[in-house]
């Protein structure tokens, strides 16, 4: 018996909810409201409608506030609609990589004596102690929040194109542990005066104690019809010819000279 009574109560509540959800209203001039079953309609000076029990009824149009009745009978937004309307638009994702005109190396003049681009009697980097220099750096957290990144820029201060650039960044955490990572470079070759950004990632490292140590490797490059030339930094002479910039890093390692080094203290 109790189960039957509870079921009847639930069915009654559902019936009332369904009636309210599908109900229209007539608002009278005196402010009272009449619930209708389904939409009402105006015919001449009369308003025809069905009562909730299905009985056809009629009222004088002069007794009904038609504008208020239309507003009362208009569909009401659901809670989900209100939440969607109030939710702010999703932020636009930041670009992962932005290239500008200055990031793309330009062709250099051809030397009349050697026929090589960017090669002349003054292209030897022997008079420049550090052809590549880390200009600036900063520490940030990784996107997942479980590590740190060292981001910065490095530039080519020599008179020759530098290629095969490899940047190692070493840091020390507050526990005295050293961590080393090879940085991701936007450009692996730089024209004289050119610069690029870099990023070194250290997962599961909480913070950095002190200044990172930057170690750079690179080779001087020039080009002619025969291919890409690797230039000896000390003499300015052609050391070997390579077919692609991917071979430049191998040329730097084979030279036994890291080409240049920088640190976070450089200007």
Image (cartoon, rainbow, N blue to C red):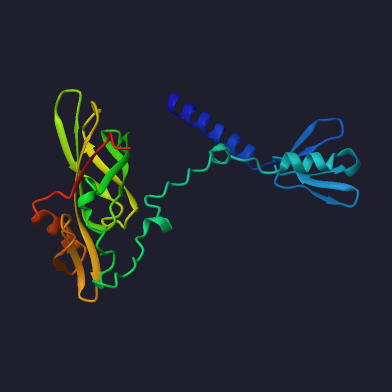
Q: How many marks?
A: 0
Specify the quadrant that holds the N terminus: top left
Specify the quadrant that holds the C terminus: top left
Report the front residue among 235 and 19: 235
Residue 216's x, y, as percent?
20, 46
Within the image, what quadrant is residue 65 found in? top right
**Is 235 left, or right, of 144 in this rendering?**
left
Report the front residue among 177 and 49: 177
Within the image, what quadrant is residue 241 found in? bottom left
Report the front residue among 188 and 51: 188
**Is 159 left, or right, of 182 in this rendering?**
right
Residue 97's x, y, as percent?
37, 52
**Is 11 left, or right, of 170 in this rendering?**
right
Q: Is residue 11 above or below residue 123?
A: above
Report the front residue among 6 and 45: 45
The residue located at (87%, 34%) in the rendering is 29
Asked whether residue 132 is in view, the answer is yes
The residue located at (80%, 39%) in the rendering is 68
**Is 69 left, or right, of 62 in this rendering?**
left
Asked whether residue 36 is in view, the answer is no
Residue 45's x, y, as percent?
91, 48
The residue located at (25%, 69%) in the rendering is 223
Residue 72's x, y, as percent?
74, 39
The residue located at (36%, 63%) in the rendering is 106
């Amino acid at each position: 018996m109790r189960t039957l009574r509870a079921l009847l109560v639930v069915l009654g509540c559902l019936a009332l909810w369904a009636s309210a959800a599908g109900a229209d209203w007539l608002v009278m001039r005196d402010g009272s409201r009449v619930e209708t079953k389904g939409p009402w309609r105006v015919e001449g000076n009369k308003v025809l409608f069905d009562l909730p029990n299905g009985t056809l009824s009629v009222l004088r149009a002069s007794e009904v506030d038609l504008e208020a009745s239309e507003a009362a009978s208009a569909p009401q937004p659901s809670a989900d609609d209100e939440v969607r309307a109030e939710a702010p638009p999703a932020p636009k994702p930041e670009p992962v990589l932005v290239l500008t005109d200055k990031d793309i190396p330009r062709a250099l003049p051809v030397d009349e004596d050697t026929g090589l681009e960017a090669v002349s009697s003054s292209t030897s980097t022997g008079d420049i102690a550090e052809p590549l220099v880390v200009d600036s750096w900063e520490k940030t957290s990784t996107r997942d929040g479980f590590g740190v990144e060292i981001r910065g820029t490095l530039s080519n201060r020599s008179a020759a194109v530098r290629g095969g650039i490899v940047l190692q960044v070493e840091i020390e955490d507050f526990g005295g542990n050293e961590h080393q990572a090879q940085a991701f470079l936007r450009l692996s070759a730089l024209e004289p005066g050119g610069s690029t950004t870099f990023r070194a990632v250290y997962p599961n490292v909480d913070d950095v104690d002190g200044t990172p140590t930057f170690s750079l490797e690179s080779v001087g490059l020039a080009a002619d019809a025969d291919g890409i030339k690797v230039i000896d930094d000390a003499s300015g002479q052609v050391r070997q010819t390579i077919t692609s910039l991917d071979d430049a890093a191998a040329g730097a390692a084979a030279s036994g000279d890291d080409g240049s080094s920088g640190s976070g203290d450089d200007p």
